[in-house]
């Protein structure tokens, strides 16, 4: 697979009105069972001066992935990040396919607890956990 190919089964996620995410994307997703796996291909614009994926890019991607997961689980209602904790485990490099694996830990009527990992193959790049608030109708 070349550095620009998208793995089979993944589709682009429409950017919708979120201009920030559109600026760092495109992001992709693939349905796996009842859930989704997300991904993006690392490009030059994602790198910092050390030639690895910028931490802000990884945190933004984790926020997007977990937010989409919550939005889906709560029936397409609006939601917002309350907290997002990130742990940098290893570096992502130019051409890497970074795959996101989200998990809903617990949900109530007003908040949803989620966590996820960003991976390159079987190597963890970032571990994230957070809480989202449910804002109301779509």
Image (cartoon, rainbow, N blue to C red):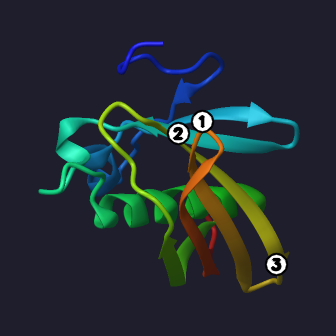
Determine the residue located farthest toward the right in the rendered image. 33
Q: Nearer the viewer, residue 8 or 16?
A: 8
- What kind of element bears circle 1? strand
Distance between the alpha carbons at the discs numbered 1 and 2 = 6 Å
* Residue sitting at x 56%, y 20%: 7
* Residue sitting at x 66%, y 19%: 9
**Label drawn at residue 107:** 3
Q: Which residue is denoted by mark 2 in the rendering?
A: 39
Left or right? Give the position of 98 relative to 122.
Answer: left
- What kind of element bears circle 2? strand
**Label drawn at residue 29:** 1
Can residue 74 be seen from the camera position used here?
A: no
Mark toward the start of the polypeptide (3 vs 1): 1
Distance between the alpha carbons at the discs numbered 3 and 2 = 24 Å
Left or right? Give the position of 38 relative to 49.
Answer: right
What percent of the width, then of the height, locates residue 17?
A: 35, 50
What percent of the width, then of the height, locates residue 90?
A: 46, 59
Left or right? Give the position of 94 relative to 133.
Answer: left
């Amino acid at each position: 697979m070349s550095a620009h190919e998208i793995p089979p089964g993944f589709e682009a996620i429409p950017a919708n009105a979120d201009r920030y995410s559109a600026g760092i994307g495109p992001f992709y997703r693939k349905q796996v069972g009842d859930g989704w796996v997300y991904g993006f291909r690392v490009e030059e614009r994602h790198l910092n001066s050390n030639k690895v994926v910028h931490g802000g890019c990884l945190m933004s991607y984790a926020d997007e992935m977990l937010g989409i997961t919550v939005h889906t689980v709560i029936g397409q209602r609006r939601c917002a990040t309350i907290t997002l904790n990130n742990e940098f485990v290893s570096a992502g490099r130019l051409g890497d396919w970074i795959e996101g694996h989200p998990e809903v830990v617990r949900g109530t009527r007003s908040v949803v607890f989620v966590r996820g990992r960003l991976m390159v193959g079987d190597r963890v790049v970032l571990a994230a956990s957070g809480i989202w608030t449910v804002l109301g109708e779509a």
